[in-house]
Image (cartoon, grey):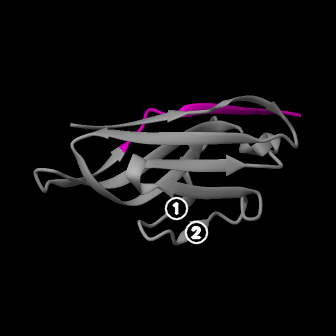
Amino acid sequence: QVQLAESGGGLVQTGGSLRLSCAASGSVLRINAMRWHRQAPGKQRELVAAITIGGNTNYADSVKGRFTISRDNAKNTVYLEMNSLKPEDTGVYYCNGDVQKYDLGYGTYWGRGTQVTVSP
């Protein structure tokens, strides 16, 4: 079994900052790409940022220059540093990862999400 668990969400004012974490546990041998998605009320889930096992990153245009994705491979953890937050950043933030397990099984696993609310 593999579990991903997000933490670090909360309520922040416009212009504030938050740091999200997502830790994988269980039968994890290696995690290739890891990603952060978000879903605002009434909208589809969208990709916010992604990072490869080698550290290459890409971002949605709406967050470039404000958000930074990073990871600690030894801890099987991915982070999302969010600065200059705007009300439109409000939503549930989910992480996922492409996991290779000790039994050599492979799959994409999701966390349950953490709420981020940015007040005007």
Residue at figure coordinates x 50%, y 35% from the top left:
6
Residue at figure coordinates x 44%, y 67% from the top left:
52
For the record, the magenta segment spans 110-120
Instruction: Tell me where residue 21 appears, x and y as whole percent.
Output: 55, 41
- Provide the residue designation for mark 2: 58
Q: Main secondary structure of the magenta part?
A: strand
Which residue is at the far front? Answer: 74
Residue 76 visible in the shown view? no
Helix, strand or loop at label 2? It is strand
Question: Quarter of the image containing the C terminus?
Answer: top right
Q: CA distance from mark 1 to mark 2?
A: 5 Å
Residue 24 relative to residue 61: left or right: left
- Provide the residue designation for mark 1: 50
Query: Looking at the picture, which amino acid does disc 2 mark?
Result: Asn
Instruction: Tell me where residue 18 appears, x and y as whole percent.
Output: 72, 39
Residue 27 relative to residue 67: left or right: left
Which quarter of the picture shows residue 118?
Answer: top right
Residue 6 relative to residue 61: left or right: left
**Would you call the spot at circle 1 few (<14 residues within 10 Å), some (14-19), or many (20 or more)?**
many
Which residue is at the far left? Answer: 103
Asked if the residue at tag 2 contacts the one at tag 1, i.e. Cβ–Cβ closer than 8 Å, the answer is: yes
